[in-house]
Amino acid sequence: MKLFLQLDLTPWQESAYQKPLLAYASSLSSDLIGAEMDNRSDASIIDILLRLCDQVTSIFIFVRAKPTEPFGSTLKLLNALLRTNQKIYTVVLSGNHEQTENLFKHLNDKFKKEEDQEKVKLWIEEFALA
């Protein structure tokens, strides 16, 4: 089983209920689960996602970010994922967020910065078929 995880580090006013890439990823394969959280998510959501991350074999992380937004509640999840980074298939950062870049830059070619959703969709398709 695989996980597409969308993390939103954006002001709450810019949060959208529709997550087109999340819906797209979830539609590609029966063994691909989609999940999302933002930097204001409750601790119980993080605990559920941590258990889910333990159960999957591969994780695609898509981060939507604005430069001044703090990690907030996502930091606990990100730290856990980085401790067991062998499950991380790729991390895509959409937007500018220096802290996120610093957190994931050691993943080298697994870390990408891209705002073009069509390019991201191609990477998601590769992930679904891998």
Image (cartoon, rainbow, N blue to C red):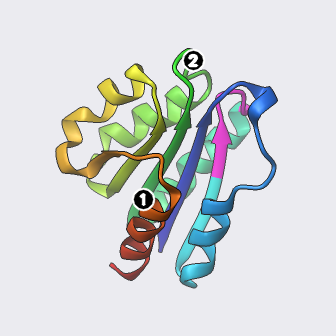
* Horizontal side of residue 76 vs 16, given as left or right: left
- Residue at the spot 75% in from the left edge and 33% down from the top edge: 14
Alpha-carbon span between mark 1 and mark 2: 22 Å
Looking at numbered disc 2 in the image, what kind of residue is underneath it? Pro
* Residue at the image position 45 percent from the left and 60 percent from the top: 120
Q: Is residue 40 magenta?
A: yes
Identify residue type, mark 1. Answer: Ile
Q: Which mark is residue 59?
A: 1
Q: Which sits in the foreground, 82 or 118?
A: 118
Q: Pointer 1: residues within 10 angstroms few (<14), some, or many (20+)? A: many
Q: Give me the residue at 76% from left, 37% from top.
A: 15
Q: Do tag 1 and tag 2 residues touch (Cβ < 8 Å)?
A: no
Q: Is residue 25 above or below residue 102?
A: below
Work out which quarter of the rendered image holds the C terminus and state it.
bottom left
Residue 39 is drawn in which quadrant?
top right
x and y percentages locating residue 23 in the rendered image? 67, 67
In the image, the segment drawn in magenta is 36-42
**Residue 98 drawn at (x, y percent):** 39, 21
As drawn, 110 above or below 108? below
x, y percent for residue 7:
58, 42
Percent x, y of residue 12: 77, 28
